[in-house]
Image (tube, rainbow, N blue to C red):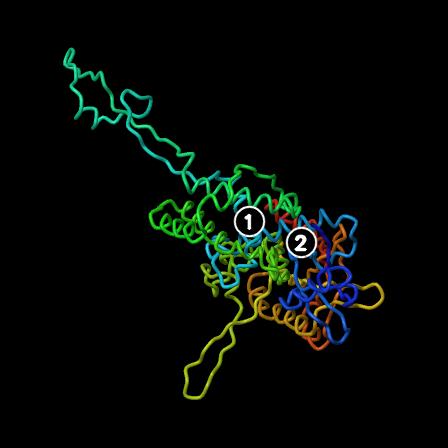
Amino acid sequence: MDSIYIRESEHYSKKYLIDLLGQSVHDKLLNQAVITYDAVNDTYQFNYVGVIIIDEMVINCYPKYIHEKSSIHDDFKQVINVIKRYESTCEDDAYEDIETDNLTSNMLPMMLFFVEDYYENGVYTKIHSILEDNGDGEIDWNRTVNKDQSIVINDKAYYTHLQTKRKLNDLYDYYRLLHEYIITDCSNYLEKNELLHLFDLTPVEISDNHLDDFGKLDFILNKLDKQQNIEFNTHKQKLLKVMHSYLSKNNLFNDENTLLLYGTRTYHDVWEKVCKHVLKDKLDKKLSKLHLPCQLNDKYNPSYELIKVIKKPTWILKDKHPRKTDTFIPDIVAIKDDQFIILDAKYYDLTTDKNISGQPGLESITKEYLYELAFKEFTEDNAFKTIKNAFLFPTEKSEVNNLGIVKLDILSLLGLQDIQLIMLPANLVYEHYLDNTKMNISHLKLE
């Protein structure tokens, strides 16, 4: 199967993409809005980061800030692991809502789930309890006492025939065998598409059955439904549910328009979440838990989170009660000694070689100034000496680089801090995120 790499947001000509993908794949991706047409430049762009499988082709879409492809395989593998962890932290249960209107895009996550879950929990098991005479299992004293006569010696009762209980794992249980078939089927598909290595998985070959061996599809799905109704183990219920979803949608593999996806169209959310985690965002911390330069000013409720310091806009309509609505919120707030640091994770491909391009717009700059204004009273009340503002851009380079500042004169005149431009090595940030470690704020090289 062909495997290619495509850069997110890169401007590609139609001829280039058709030569690379073929007319059919190009049209299908366009119809699914995985690629979009830029009428101004007469080019096409992929607005996706992750894996796409279509028409016997694997398309690996890597983030737009990566320009050097010499280590693209390792870089992309790290990105996939980041997306994987991001999704697991965004949802209480990544497969709880596996039945959606557009399950086609969820087939790939389901296949990964089956293989990963096998290594963590094994296969579906059905345990039978059997009774034995004088067996090696636990003694069932109620049955023993009621069934057999005891021998009394020195006022002690002795039983020559013991009723014992033993638990037996049914290796030929229908649902166990079906689960083994699905795991093997998923592993074979992932291996064929060279995805096992990408997700750090090894092949699983535990069944030589075929789907037809379990009956017609309607019969199989009906049995899974019935088993769900009598299964009380939470994990087993989940397995049965995902097995039902997988088999009910399995015919999609025979549909020429099938598109399998693992990734995201909103990688900016991933970059923001990763930065928040790695840089120890304080917005949701209670004021009493913050390491402030002085004791918390009495005007603030110590049980409030820092985010509540930001005042909300109030709408006052005639003959109506005032109403407060949502306000603007920065991505990250960090505190270092007497410095109050406001950071915004910007998923932009900022370049400064000749001219500045890929930079945030006026709205982003204005909002960053407003964040400082929103916290100004709080910082003054609690002995902070300085406030620092910065944008955090991902870069494929290995060193943190403070490029300089962006400022808006009409707001700088109010005494607000200029916004520093920090190029943050994505690989380094991802390492911290995947290892669940934190990055020292001093590494940002803020001035």
Kind of element beneath mark 2: loop
Which residue appears farthest toward the right when viewing the image?
A: 354
Dot 2 amino acid type: Glu
**Direction from residue 7 to residue 332 in the image, left or right:** left
Point out residue 102 in the picture as x, y percentages from the top left corner.
53, 62
Instruction: Judge by depth and name the residue closer to the eye, 141 or 190.
Output: 190
Residue under numbered circle 2 = 56
Which x, y percent locates residue 324?
47, 75
Q: Earlier in the sequence, mark 2 or mark 1?
A: 2
Q: Nearer the viewer, residue 322 or 398?
A: 398
Between residue 68 and residue 39, name the one nearer to us. Answer: 39
For residue 190, side relative to residue 118 (left or right): right
Could you tell me how many numbered marks the image carries?
A: 2
User: Up-down: is 98 above or below 196?
Assistant: below
**Extreme-bottom residue of the structure:** 318
Q: Position of residue 271 (x, y in %)?
A: 64, 58
Q: Is there a contact, CB below 8 Å, between mark 2 and mark 1?
A: no
Q: Nearer the viewer, mark 2 or mark 1?
A: 2
Q: Mark 1 = which residue?
A: 111
Res 55 label: none
Location of the C terminus by quadrant is bottom right
Name the residue located 71 percent from the left edge and 51 percent from the top edge: 3
